Amino acid sequence: VMPETAVEMGVSPRRLFDAQDNVAAGTRYLAEQVGRFHGELPKALAAYNAGPGAVLSGQPLPRETRLYVPRVLARYRALKE
């Protein structure tokens, strides 16, 4: 989780090295993105990785994000089975 995002999620940037606080902030942020994009996981994951503005802009997403989303979705589907 980026320090700015941590603050938005109520976690001090100094606490990001604490695994529990980091996971809590990341989980809250992902849940926020899932809500923002009405449950559309690919968009929510892209927003989690690149920021919601990048998704909402309609511009091509960064390469890192284009690789990240299918990789996370594949892992999610495998674990769900």
Image (cartoon, rainbow, N blue to C red):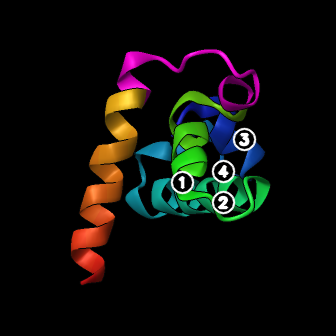
Spatial CA span between label 4 and label 2: 20 Å
**Mark 4: which secondary structure?**
loop
Residue 76 falls left or right of residue 9? left
Q: Which mark is in front, 4 or 1?
A: 1
Residue 18 falls left or right of residue 14? left
Decide which of tag 2 and tag 1 comes sooner along the chain: 1
The residue lying furthest to the bottom in this view is 81
For mark 2, what is the residue?
34
Spatial CA span between label 2 and label 3: 19 Å
For mark 3, what is the residue?
7
Three-letter amino acid code of the residue under disc 4:
Val
For mark 4, what is the residue?
11
Spatial CA span between label 3 and label 1: 11 Å
Three-letter amino acid code of the residue under disc 1:
Gly
Decide which of tag 4 and tag 1 comes sooner along the chain: 4
Marks 4 and 3: CB-CB under 8 Å?
Answer: yes
Q: Residue at x 33, y 52 (%)?
A: 72
Residue 27 falls left or right of residue 28? left
Three-letter amino acid code of the residue under disc 2:
Val
Residue 26, numbered circle: 1
